[in-house]
Image: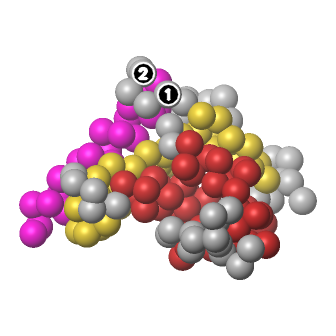
Amino acid sequence: MTNPFLHVELHSDGACLGNPGPGGWACILRPLGQLTDEQVLVGGDAATTNNRMELTGVLEGLRSLPDGAHVEVSADSQYVLKGLSDWLDNWKRRGWRTASRKPVKNEDLWRALDIERTRLELSYVWVEGHAGHPDNERCDALAKQQAEMFQQEN
């Protein structure tokens, strides 16, 4: 059931320096339509892929929200958005196989996202990357900073 008092925008992006390589993710959460009361989450990994970072940004944002929240997920990754909205149910029906019967990549993260989407009401907004969308640009910069931090640690 949707929590009528909690409608949230989740903006997310991931970055990787090399693919695979050190990577970072970032997300911004705020009440829908407001510019205040935001929460920024960031993280990364020393050895990862861009797709894993894209998925992790959304996953960590969703994990931070209470049951029943309505979340408008905004990202520049068609892989993430189509995976959540179109592909995930079919992958599950096929035993975590793609339409071409290959194992689903990043299955661990998709399984975790599947759990989150059962307790939240999600809608999806695709934004073009590097096209001046302020929240997407900010997430991109934060994700790159995280990737650079993990690169420097090695």
Q: Give the SS element for disc 1.
A: loop
Q: Position of residue 120 (x, y in %)?
A: 76, 59
Q: Is residue 112 left or right of residue 52?
A: right
- Residue 56 is labelled as none
Quadrant location of residue 68? Answer: bottom right
Q: Position of residue 30 (x, y in %)?
A: 59, 41
Q: Give the SS element for disc 2.
A: loop
Please state the extent of the stretch shown in magenta in the rendering: 133-154
Q: Which residue is mark 2?
A: 131
Q: Quadrant of the N terminus?
A: bottom right
- Residue 128 is labelled as 1
Most common SS among magenta residues: helix
From where the camera sits, is residue 113 visible? no
Indicate the amino acid at tag 1.
Glu
Q: Could you tell me which residue is drawn at 73 percent across and 51 percent down?
A: 86
CB of mark 1 within 8 Å of CB of mark 2?
Answer: yes
